[in-house]
Amino acid sequence: MSDVKTQTRHIADRLESPLKLAVFSWPSLLLVVAIALFILNSFMSPYFLSAWSLSDATFNFTEKAIIAFAMALLIISGEIDLSVAAIIALSSTIMGLCLQLGFGTSELVLVGLFVGVLCGAFNGSLVVGLGLPSIVVTIGTMSFFRGISFIILGDQAFNGYPAEFAFFGQGYVWWVISFEFVLFLIVAFAYFVLLHKTNFGRQIFVIGNNATAAQFSGVRVKRVKFILFCLVGLMSGIAAVLLTSRLGSTRPSIAQGWELEVITMVVLGGISILGGSGTIQGVFIAAFIMGLISFGLGLLNVPGIVMSIFIGALLIIVIALPIIAGKIKNRLKA
Amino acid sequence: MQNSVIKLSGISKSFPGVKALRNVELELYRGQVTALIGENGAGKSTLVKTMTGIYQPDEGEISVNGKVVVLGSAHDVFSHGITAIHQETVLFDEMSVAENIYLGHTPKTKFRTIDWKKLYSDAAIILNDIGASHIDAHTKLKEISIANKHLVSVARALSVEADIVIMDEPTAALSHKEIEDLFQLVDKLKNDGKAILFISHKFDEIYKIAERYTVFRDGQMVGRGMLSDTSQDEIVQMMVGRSVDQIFPKRNASIGAPVLHVENYNHPTEFADINFELNKGEILGFYGLVGAGRSELMQALFGITKPSSGTLTISGQEITLKGPADAVKAGIVYLPEERGKQGVILDLPIVENISLPSLHTTSKNGFLKMVNEFALARKYAERLDLRAASLSQHAGTLSGGNQQKVVIAKWLAVEPNILILDEPTKGIDIGSKAAVHSFMAELVAEGLSVIMVSSEIPEVMGMSDRIIVMRDGLIADIFQNNEDLTAETLIRSAAGIEEQVA
Amino acid sequence: MRSIHRYHEFWLTLIIALMVVGTTLRSPGFISGQKMIEIFNDSSMLIILALGQMAVILTRSIDLSMASNLALSGMIVALINAAYPEIPIPVLMLIATSCGLLMGVFNGSLVWWLGIPSIVVTLGTLTIYRGIIFVLAGGKWVNADAFTENFIQYTRVEFLGIPALSWYAIIIVLAFFIFMTRTSAGRSIYAIGINPSAALYTGINIGKTQFMTFCISGALSGFCGYLWVSRYVIGSVEVAKGYELIVVAACVIGGISIAGGVGTVIGTVLGALFLGFISNALPVIGVSPFWQMAISGGAIILAVIINASSQTQGKRIILKNREAQS
């Protein structure tokens, strides 16, 4: 065995080109689906291919997608947050309270974001600090946060947000390009960089794959997870600002049921619900797919509830197909 | 010559990267105990799993009472009268003792529902039979001691009508008194005509209880016969006698000043009174039986578990470790024993595995620089002669030995001062083993200090400058590794057997 | 903490009893037999659903589609009743249960054969099942005047002063109790939740057992579909919307560990009763019903904290002299 180090073999960085890998990836598959839906939509309805109706369509998904990006990171790390919609409700309610106290637009926004982060930190401390399962903790805080909104508001609503506040959810930056859409693009890019281009992002993948090995490699697992809960809270706070501004009012039932839609978007985007893998690109395209489905069917006067059949079926089919294909392949081999 | 009850012949079993069993033979006889002897990784556990339907052998056949059988499921195993008491107690913490004994074959009422009354009374009878009447069949399993859990698994094994009883290290967690009780039980089983396979590391036990022995080494059967015809020394020879196919690198130790002081390290349940020091350029071996507390101590030195008291001094500076990140910063790294769970991240590329603890040096302002990561990974992968097609390959696709090299590369990349290796060559092939050994020699020559936990006598004796033996969470002995030290001394020290007067 | 956990049901009973006493002090006359029956009757469906969810959670899965399943099964029998009033109600109950079972089979198959995580499967079927309601009913509601008198009465008739709805719950609780504690199938459910690899050694088929629990939760949801429509005399897309998480909440409060293997039928029933009690008691003591949600949220969080702290796994003790002390 003395010849072990006499010759050094060269090991390639990669065997397959990154381009080839990208072509045969989950996001590419989603992209094909998205393009197909787009073409289908433009055949189905003459109103679809107008700049304004396309712009309107984006409002269907931008707020949810903004949360979905942070949720993607959290799910990759092996945790989940079911309380996001409740955070929106609480955050919006506190903004409404502060509005009554005479806060201005910028303070309202800050309050909204702050409440979001605070709720995220609350979830994070319970999960990370006490080592509780996140799915149950956030089912609890989901009722708890929205419950506080109900206590404060009852069956009332907060109205009368200042005119400038309306810009966030209703304003346009240029022509048909809404503020929300621009923010969505910026957030998508920021999360793309954070997850795929930074040390922090790498640690998220490592933790999701094997939290023990991550800890044994010196990764501060608890800290990373806590930060992710805070980030999800922050994004829910942002979504609260956008949604409150768009609706112009706050009711405790605001954004009801969004948590499951956000998670559907994340899973459809190819993030493994078991943690450890996924891309922001996938979630980005999944957001468009969900937007296209609801908007396209909306143009055909198909009610929202029916669209959910398509979204639910899509969720199961896109996950089941590769598994079935793999099973068939194995059987052929054997 | 009497006929065997069960006969395994020509059994082979491979896993990716490892040949766990190669053409092994085993026979058990009615009313006799056969001891299966071998070091960790010799293939004993794999054999047990083959006999209990968890693994299917790649080659070979198993026959019970002369008929060839297939043990494909737990039911097949039961129906052929085989039962096992497992090393890892495979029981249900949240269930009662009685249910643990009978789950899967509970007594039923005439309505086909579980007859709890009969269940508890049957359980009490069987517990009484094995001298464990002090265990209340109604208690939840999680509320009884480990020793009692073992008795429950014994009771479970005996609750089915079995001719063949496999006991996989049944005494590992038992006290002296409890072992005595267990042996009475084994005697009773013998008298009942059962054929028993008894797996243990402890020679005194083997000689006390067994008639026959079979020795495994590196997945092969290297000897069998009657214990009455064989001396203890001969068996130790068979177990460890690997002088022919394993050469350890020769090195001229130039040992320097102490770099690590451990003083009065204590832990509530895992270890106590730990005092030792590690010198620059030294390989310090830690030998002991499985469960002697070696890994637990090492994990405390790496900041994973916290000691309840004691001080740790590194290069003259006393430090407190809040977590592994602190340890890495202080220059201590730890190569875990559980490679798949704690070492490599199987679904990530090799490059990301290696660069993980060094990200702060390869990246720029927190942004990843893949070029640097590849360069770093290549440097160490090539130095360790990693056999991989590319650095982007998932670590899980590599053989065990190469996975181990990935973990070593990961830690060398942070340029540590102290390297703790926990069973560094467990379950890897001979070639990789030699590579790891020569690399260790090279590292200490460069001035690193190494702590090596190993349960393999030749490895400990072949590599270490000094050897610390741990037993039951305490340091039993510290030996200088010179010509006077024999394998037998180490084995005796680890098992707590008094030296025989020659 | 161990003693608290050992008597999780005891503590929960105590808390509910304290609440009853507290409420009575604030509002004398609250503690009447009639009121107790009313609270139990109100909680009946939650109890039945929580039992189904319990079986699923014990095997380390989750069924988020229960409320949608309930709504769809309910809509199907509502439509049948409106169109063919002559069909006897027990047949409708059977139809509702079978529809639910079918949906459970679909969930369970995806989990068993394809190995898709149950949370993903049921997140998908949650939206699908509810969407189908709309398609079936053409977006319309089935209103009170569409139902036959029998359809409505089958949950209301009283026997021994207790409404039929409560009797259904009582029978199912008893049946479930026997199933979970007296049958091999019930014990396998616990076994694979406590220790899947040990269960394998015992010869239990994990996938098949999980499949069975989805069938159970599906069938119970379907049966509750009829009960819900009959009790609230309405069939619509909105029926029981968001109720899936309340069902999970009842389980968690009842001491079911989301990590599987731990929890009892009695605990689950108490968890459901706890939530049912809160919604009944708050108005009586003059607290706005809007407090209900926050209180159940707080209860869930507390329950998880208590469950977790009592379930810390004992590690192997190496030091000999310490073992005796433990």
Image (cartoon, helix red, strand yellow):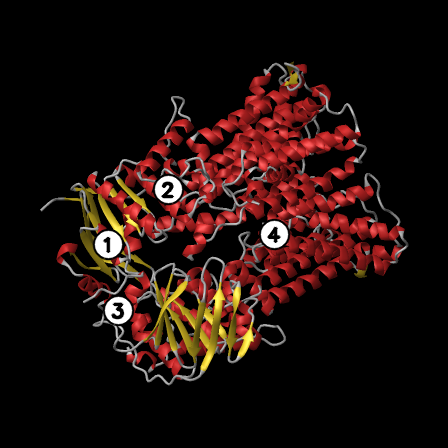
Between C321 and A177, the one lying in front of the other is C321
Type of amino acid at the residue the image marks with label 1: Ile
Residue C296's spot in the image, x, y percent? 69, 40
What is the spatial separation of the Cα atoms under label 2 and label 1, in whole angstroms? 22 Å
Chain of residue at mark 2? B
Asked if marks 3 and 1 fall on the same chain, the answer is yes
Between C174 and A97, the residue placed more toward the observer is: C174
Of labels 3 and 1, earlier in sequence is 1
Number of marks present in the image shown: 4
Q: Quadrant of the N terminus of chain C?
A: top right
Instruction: Check disc 4 and report the residue beneath it.
Output: A80
Disc 4 marks a residue whose amino acid type is Ile
Q: Are marks 2 and 3 on the same chain?
A: yes
Q: Nearer the viewer, residue B374 or A149?
A: A149
Report if residue C290 is visible in the image: yes
Mark 1 = which residue? B206
